[in-house]
Image (tube, helix red, strand yellow):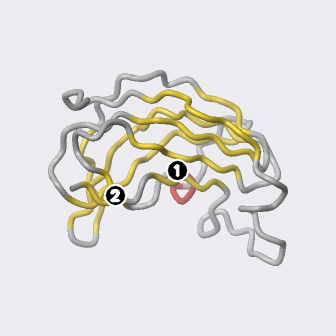
């Protein structure tokens, strides 16, 4: 069901990953501006009117994170830049704790938008409540058709 231009996120299935599945096996750089500490992945293809899309959050670091599973913005790709397509959300802005190696799947109701390439931006923070770098707060790009 399409709901005007608002989102609604619902926790669907939380579960813990088997040790290091997504974190890799050492040897990687620790530059927080280029190496994601959090993976946020949305469905690769979104069909308007098909209902909510699943978004998966994976904590790839060795410490707990706080995340808001309600999107802050929906961004549309226009040429080589990202522009805000929607900031109208109807879900809780509560920050949830995600332990190291843990994964959380939420369902997000998708707004009525035009076809194109989009991504979602979320509120993701460390335990001191400091906002993580942008690389840790945006989902993969996905097609809306």
Q: Quadrant of the C terminus?
A: bottom left
Residue at position x 42%, y 53% from top? 43
Residue at position x 43%, y 38% from top? 71
Residue at position x 59%, y 47% from top? 57
- Picture quadrant of residue 99: top right
Residue 37, numbered label: none
Q: Residue 102, position in %: x, y?
A: 74, 45
Alpha carbon distance from label 2 to label 1:
20 Å
Residue 45, numbered label: 2
Residue to which mark 1 is pinned: 137
Q: Is residue 31 left or right of residue 91?
A: right
> How many residues crowd mark 2 within 10 Å: few (<14), some (14–19), many (20+)?
few
In this view, the residue farthest toward the front is 50
- Picture quadrant of residue 66: top right
Q: Residue 2, position in %: x, y?
A: 23, 31
Q: Secondary structure at mark 1?
A: loop
Q: Residue 62, position in %: x, y?
A: 82, 52
């Amino acid at each position: 069901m399409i709901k005007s231009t608002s989102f609604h996120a619902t926790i669907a299935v939380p579960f813990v990953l088997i040790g290091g599945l997504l974190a890799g096996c050492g040897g990687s750089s620790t530059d927080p501006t280029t190496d994601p500490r959090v993976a946020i992945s949305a469905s690769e293809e979104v069909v308007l009117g098909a209902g909510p899309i699943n978004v998966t959050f994976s904590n790839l670091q060795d410490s707990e994170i706080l995340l808001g599973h309600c999107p802050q913005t929906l961004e549309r790709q226009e040429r080589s830049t990202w522009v805000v397509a929607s900031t109208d959300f109807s879900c809780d802005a509560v920050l949830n704790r995600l332990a190291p190696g843990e994964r959380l799947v939420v369902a997000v109701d998708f707004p009525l938008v035009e076809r194109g390439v989009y991504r979602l931006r979320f509120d993701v923070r460390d335990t001191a409540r400091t906002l993580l770098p942008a690389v840790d707060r945006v989902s993969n790009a996905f097609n809306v058709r």
